Image (spheres, rainbow, N blue to C red):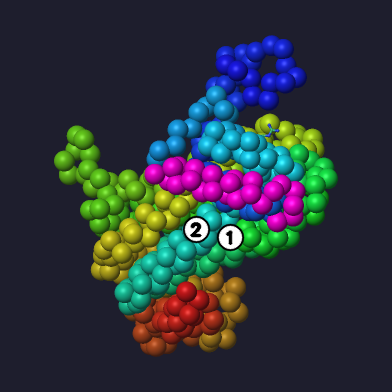
Amino acid sequence: MAKQWGGRFEGKTDALVEALGQSVSYDARLAPWDIRASVAHARMLGNEGIITRADSRKIVAGLTAIAKDIEAGRFVFDPSLEDVHTNIEAALVKRIGDAGKRLHTGRSRNDQVATDVRLWTRDQIDAILSLLKGIQAAFVNFAEAHLDVILPGCTHLQHAQPVLLAHHMLAYFEMFARDRERFTQLRSRVNVMPLGSAALAGTPYPINREWVAKELGFERSSANSMDAVSDRDFVIAFCAAASLTMMHLSRFSEELILWSAPEYNFIEIGDAYTTGSSIMPQKKNPDVAELVRGKTGRVYGDLTALLTLMKGLPLTYNRDLQEDKEALFDASDTVQLCLAVVTRMIPSIHVHARAMQSATREGYLEATDVADYLAGKGMPFREAHSVVGRIVLYCAKNGRRIPELSIKEFRSFAACFEADVVSMLSAESIVQRRDNPGGTSPRRVREALRKAKRSL
Ligand code: ARG
């Protein structure tokens, strides 16, 4: 293989080095962003008289034609040319001759790749932000369609207190609202232009960074050329934000998996999002939720790979940095696919409201409210807590539920019990009483729904 930029070499490159060093098999997807950045750079070079306007125009026309070929699938990327940048530059020179050789004036692949990846990441963030809005809307619609459904709220996966299913679903709305905040903040840190940093130290040409930044929609230009060519914080931060979104998707998936198990039988996920078994004809498995849960580990892996990649790198650019792309692309593709699939799966979920409701009869979900009742009668809460503990033990030993106890039985534990205790122990009235901001009462949940809709 002939050596690229071979002027200072006498020997050939080892045959295996191409396999190790080529990145075009995966970074070819950066081509549209690479060309946008190159067009802006070439126009600036022409405007500033660094190259002639005629050459600048030829370059822009050549790049535009190459972009069309790539889009139409007519462009052949050659791994012996290493990466997307050199493939496009070589094609340009082939197409327009010497003018093409002037494109790289005043820049380096180091600021070029950093610019491309930032442009690409900015677009992915925009796509993710709209997917996050979409999944939030799915949770709002689902909550609204099930406003009267009550289920056991759990801590330690043990029945704790009854809650509205809508309240449970709006908990996920909040998680994805935080994800949106995170990606929004990240967007402005990503939106900084490295171009003009050249290899590491800047360039002596009289370039106009402000013009290029504006042309490419960057909020500002990087302040330090050495930082700009070697910083991949934004790639790591992107994978960290994607990891948190995956974690949220994974927790939801886990609940769907549990809830569709026969032991719960709380829900049935639609046919489009479940699969059969190759041997057991009766099976309807929640594979989609399981795959989302599984893919979460893979995105954490991307994050870990990048943190490890960066930790020992001296300033400035090191070739190790080429390894940032597959992890970044994988995290981005995975989080976008999973967000889209889960958003579509949500409306397919059929709720077994009766099963949820009858589960609230198990596990003494009324216990806290009985203690609150006694505290309301003047008993210190700690004492009330232990009285109710004895009531629960009595029920457990005798196979009874708290609301079934007679007033006589209640009084055998504390004299201040009165007949009104029983009426306050239905799941509905327990839920109703949690009426402070952030609580599960129907009034508060409807209020939260209104607020959620406004934020979309
Ligand atoms: N493909 C390279 C990367 O992704 C582009 C930059 C190459 N720069 C260099 N000095 N070898 O990192």
Which three-letter amino acid code belongs to the residue tagged 1? Phe
155 relative to 75, above or below: below
Where residue 246 sits in the image (x, y, percent)? 50, 51
Q: Nearer the viewer, residue 369 or 383?
A: 369
SS at mark 2 in the image: helix
Confirm or deny contact between disc 2 and disc 1 (CB under 8 A).
yes
Q: Quadrant of the N terminus?
A: top right
SS at mark 1 in the image: helix
Distance (Cα) linking label 2 and label 1: 8 Å
Q: Residue at x 45, y 82 (%)?
A: 450
Where residue 93 sits in the image (x, y, percent)? 58, 35
Q: Nearer the viewer, residue 311 or 297?
A: 311
Q: Which residues are magenta?
A: 47-72
Residue placed farthest to the left in the image?
Answer: 281
Left or right of 248? Residue 111 is right
The residue pinned by badge 2 equals 128
Where residue 60 sits in the image (x, y, percent)? 57, 49
Q: Residue at x 50, y 58 (%)?
A: 128
Answer few, some or many: residues within 10 Å of disc 1's Cα (few below 14, many 20 plus, some between 14 and 19). many
Which three-letter amino acid code belongs to the residue tagged 2? Ile
Q: Nearer the viewer, residue 380 or 266?
A: 266
Residue placed farthest to the top in the image?
Answer: 11
